[in-house]
Image (cartoon, grey):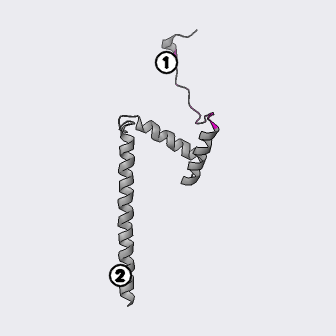
Amino acid sequence: MRSNAQRAQEPEPSHSGRLLLRMPKTLHAELASRSDAEGVSLNQFIVSALARAVSADTPEGGGPAAAPERERSLRIALIVNAVVVAIAAATAIALLIYAFR
């Protein structure tokens, strides 16, 4: 039998990167639906979601309470960006119409 000191000296086993996971069928269906909506594979979607969940729990990530604030800020930034692009597109169209007259 090995002591704790002997176990501590052994290198950590490497992880294969593979994980068999059982989940409710409804959760599987929801994850598949969302991955389709984002245009990514189910595996890629789940890995990304897990990575976001883990980083949100770290002090650098701001913790779970900061996640809604980050989502809100991102949503506002995307809306502002869309408005700026729409204004630029409308201006470009107006200039083209003016140039061709």
Q: Could you say which disc has been placed on residue 95 in the image?
A: 2
Q: Residue furthest front?
A: 26
Badge 1 or badge 2: first in the primary sequence = 1
Find residue 80 and report its horizontal and vertical position in percent.
Answer: 35, 60
99 over 1 or under it: above or below: below
Q: Residues within 10 Å of mark 2 (few under 14, many from 20)?
A: few
Say which quadrant the C terminus sits in: bottom left
Q: Quadrant of residue 79?
A: bottom left
Q: Main secondary structure of the magenta part?
A: loop
**Nearest the camera: 61 or 38?**
38
The magenta stretch spans residue 16? yes
Q: 4 left or right of 93?
A: right
Q: Could you say which disc has been placed on residue 62 in the image?
A: none
Q: Residue furthest top?
A: 1
Q: Quadrant of residue 20?
A: top right
Q: Which residue is mark 1?
A: 9
Q: In terms of secondary structure, where does tag 2 sit?
A: helix
Residue at (50% x, 12% y) in the render: 4
Q: Residues within 10 Å of mark 1 (few under 14, many from 20)?
A: few
Q: Quadrant of residue 99?
A: bottom left
The residue range painted magenta reads 7-24
**Nearest the camera: 32 or 44?**
32
Find residue 24 and report its horizontal and vertical position in percent.
Answer: 62, 36
Find residue 82 and report its horizontal and vertical position in percent.
Answer: 39, 63
Residue depth check, mark 1 versus mark 2: number of the one nearer the observer: 2
